[in-house]
Image (cartoon, helix red, strand yellow):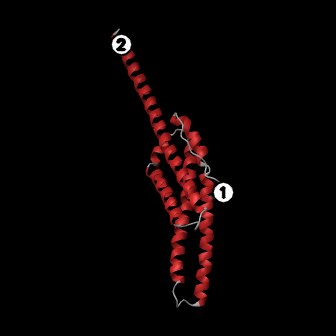
Amino acid sequence: MVMFGAVLATVGGFAATQFEWFIERRRRERHSALFFGEILTTLATILEFAHETHGRGDPFGPITLRMLRSAKRELDMYERNRETLYDIHDAELRARIHGLVIRINAPLDGVFDATDEIHNIEGLLRAPSLPAEHRAELEKRDERLRLHREGSYEYAMEMAAQIATIVADLEPRAHGTISAKPVRDEPG
């Protein structure tokens, strides 16, 4: 009888531990889905605002660039917490989230890099003693950088349109609704 009691206690302890592990695993997945859903939703909203300001006045004026920097801060928050992405047990969804973040982050870096270069070139072009051949070369470089910046921006916006689909796929794991509206295709 003592032996039977010991076996029951062992099995009960094992079952309780397994059940506790299962509950903790679900809690962590829910928390992770909510966290990344919120980051992506906020990112979509910020990029929507950036898209609206891009369509008015100077496409890469100070307000648009501030909005894009805010989006970059959201991406930095993702990066700081990326290891919790592994609490989501769907490997394909994790890969889609990470791939999307990379495909938005890299072009935003391109926008910022091109903008810095353009500002440097504008400063050089203001020099009154700049030789004509250097001026022409800088103007060509400036034109290429502006095209590169616009292309990077457009690609980031194209990728951002995928956020709503990923957020919708996170909702069942979050056990609730996380709303993200898609970024519009047309400026303004």
Q: Nearer the viewer, residue 73 or 184?
A: 184
User: What element does badge 2 sit on?
Assistant: helix
Residue 30: percent from the left, percent from the top?
48, 36
Q: CA distance from mark 1 to mark 2?
A: 71 Å
68 versus 78 height, above or below: below
Residue 151: percent from the left, percent from the top?
63, 64
Specify the farthest residue to the front.
57
Please name the residue shown 47% across and 48% down the image: 82
Residue type indicated by callout 1: Glu
143 versus 64 height, above or below: below
Please name the residue shown 55% across and 47% down the image: 97
Q: Is residue 38 left or right of residue 163?
A: left
Mark nearest the camera among 1 and 2 is 1
Q: Quadrant of the N terminus?
A: top left
Please name the residue shown 61% across and 44% down the image: 165
Of the two numbered discs 1 and 2 on the same chain, state the one appearing first in sequence: 2
Specify the farthest residue to the right.
186
Residue type indicated by callout 2: Gly
**Pointer 1 local density, CA inside 10 Å: few below 14, some 14–19, many at least 20:** few
Specify the farthest residue to the top.
1
Q: Nearer the viewer, residue 188 or 164?
A: 188
Please name the residue shown 54% across and 74% down the image: 118
Residue 163: percent from the left, percent from the top?
58, 48
User: What element does badge 1 sit on?
Assistant: loop
Residue under pointer 1:
186
**Pointer 2 local density, CA inside 10 Å: few below 14, some 14–19, many at least 20:** few
Q: What is the tally of numbered marks visible in this picture?
A: 2
Residue under pointer 2:
5
Does the residue at mark 1 contact the one at mark 2 (Cβ under 8 Å)?
no
Q: Quadrant of the C terminus?
A: bottom right
6 versus 91 height, above or below: above
Which numbered disc covers residue 92?
Answer: none
